[in-house]
Amino acid sequence: YWFAGMLPRMEDFANALYTIDIGQNDLSLAFSTMTNDQVRDTIPDILAGLSLVVK
């Protein structure tokens, strides 16, 4: 494949920095349907749900 030379080597994965971009939809919905205080109160539940999914 033309992109084969662009992929990292297998040994590079062990040294890579990974970022996970999740939860934006939950926060977007919260900010569009709740007050700031309600959003603040909801954040622990959102984080708990994300924690379960990541495990």
Image: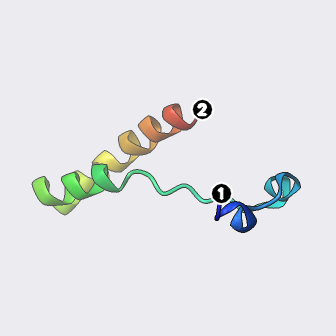
Q: Is residue 16 left or right of residue 23?
A: right
Front residue (pair 21, 34): 21
Q: CA distance from mark 1 to mark 2?
A: 34 Å
Residue at position x 36%, y 49% from top? 43
| In the depicted structure, whether residue 18 falls above or below residue 46 | below
Q: Is residue 5 left or right of residue 50?
A: right
- Looking at the rendered image, the disc whose residue lies closer to the viewer, 1 or 2, is 1
Which residue position holds label 2?
55
Identify the element where label 1 is drawn.
Answer: loop
Front residue (pair 28, 17): 17
Tell me if mark 2 has few (under 14), some (14-19) or many (20+) residues whose alpha carbon lies within 10 angstroms of its own.
Answer: few
Front residue (pair 44, 15): 15
Residue at position x 65%, y 64% from top? 3
Front residue (pair 40, 48): 48
Tell me if mark 1 has few (under 14), some (14-19) or many (20+) residues whose alpha carbon lies within 10 angstroms of its own.
Answer: few
In percent of width and height, residue 51 lies at 52, 38
The quadrant in which residue 9 appears is: bottom right
Q: Residue furthest right?
A: 11
In percent of width and height, residue 17 lies at 72, 62
Where does the N terminus fall, quadrant-wise?
A: bottom right
Residue at position x 76%, y 61% from top? 8
Q: Which mark is residue 1?
A: 1
